[in-house]
Image (spheres, grey):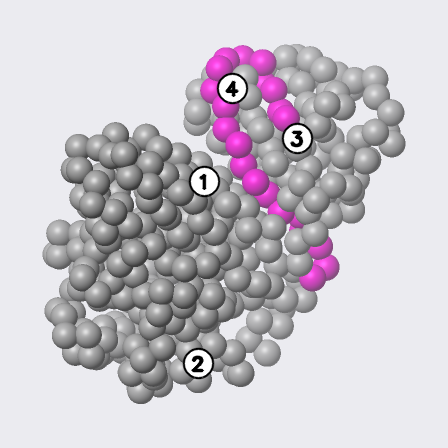
Amino acid sequence: MRLPKGFLASGVRAGIRKKRPDLGLIVAPDGANAAAVFTKNRFQAAPVTLSKAALKNSGGKLKAVVVNAGCANAVTGKAGHDAAKRVRSRTAELLACSDEDVFIASTGVIGVVLPDKKVTATLPDAITRLSSGGIDALSHAILTTDVGPKVTQATFTLGGKRGRIVGVAKGAGMIHPNMATMLGFVMTDAALDPATLKRALTIAVDQSFNAISVDGDTSTNDTVLLMASGKLGNTARADIADFQRALNTVCRDLAWMIVRDGEGATRVMELTVRGAKTDRDAKLAAHAVATSPLVKTALHGGDPNWGRMLAALGRSGARFNVKRVSLFAANVPLVTNGEPAIYKEKDAAKVFTRERVPITLDLGGGNATTVVLASDLGHDYISINADYRS
């Protein structure tokens, strides 16, 4: 896969991680407009606070993105902040741009200061290796506990011209709405201003990265960045509806890859909550069911133990009438109007053994709907996280 016009990328090993690539670089030689969304965790990592400020001060413009794996550089105080600034300054020096034109991101262990000397020493190699086909190397360099890389693309028509969007992400654990332990970098050749990009990104993230859950945790470094090189040359007033569709598709594809790659995950529940009185009620219900350890372990076992889902719904805080609640596994009715439905256990069990398990929870009280993807929870999740720093 090649990047949209106006972008180059690379991925190299700086020595932060053992034996694996751990430093990625994205460069827009002629600059790009940009917008980002960040974690809502109050312990925001140094790269998050610096990049937030840089985007604001530059008016939503950037020239490069430096991302490392193996060290989150979060909760590291002034030492971590200074280390991130040194990486940013060295990148700006090498690319002949201002510090605020450089966006930085990190992922890995919290509480460890970024070994910036390793990063700055490797930057010249990363720059030498930049290419329009560097997305593959980049996708490997940003991984932590991920099984594999996450890359996708889509096309769109904007102002009569055919454009492209390419996205790359990492994430497998600490995944939950309001951002998660994930980094996402989305690039397009469209000519769109930062304000338009921010509106489009917010819409796309709400239905993708903010609608997945692996374990209910969110982290300190989560970032999704959208960059537009402007090389498509479309008019500024072009209708962006098809661009929005393509962006939504890219973000949803990446979100699916993240939750499917959930640490030790074997299947994913696609939970649709409908019939809620308000969007808030729908989300409260969905998130309670999606994050329930009992629901997730039943999912891992392929067990249609629907009582666990209703128990989670009952403590969710969502408003509903218990006598109007219905539950379905694909087209198999499990509960009808608050009472057990008549169905064959083998039919329900067959649905629960799919890779993607469709569940519909109807609250029977309104028109609000939401969809959340949630992975199962099995033995491997414990092993991966118990041994993470070993």
- Which residue, given by chain and number where applicable, does mark 2 sit on? 13
Is-magenta flag for residue 374? yes
Camera-near label (1 vs 3) is: 1
Q: Which residue is mark 1?
A: 249
C-alpha span from label 4 to label 2 = 49 Å
Q: Earlier in the sequence, mark 2 or mark 3?
A: 2
Q: Are marks 3 and 4 in contact (CB under 8 Å)?
A: no
Question: How many other residues sit within 10 Å of disc 1, few (<14), some (14-19) or many (≥20)?
Answer: many
Closer to viewer: mark 1 or mark 4: 1
Q: CA distance from mark 3 to mark 4?
A: 15 Å
- Residue 364 place in picture, x, y as percent: 58, 14
- Residue nearer the viewer, 66 or 174: 66
Kindly identify which residue carries mark 3: 359
The amino acid type found where label 3 is placed reads Ile
Question: Nearer the N terminus, badge 2 or badge 1?
Answer: 2
Report the residue at 76% width, 23% height from top. 332
Can residue 316 be seen in this snapshot? Answer: no
Are the residues tagged 2 and 1 within 8 Å (C-beta)?
A: no
Q: Look at the picture and state if 247 lies above or below 25.
A: above
Q: Amino acid at mark 4?
A: Ala
Specify the amino acid type for callout 2: Arg
Task: State left or right for residue 275 relative to residue 335.
Answer: left
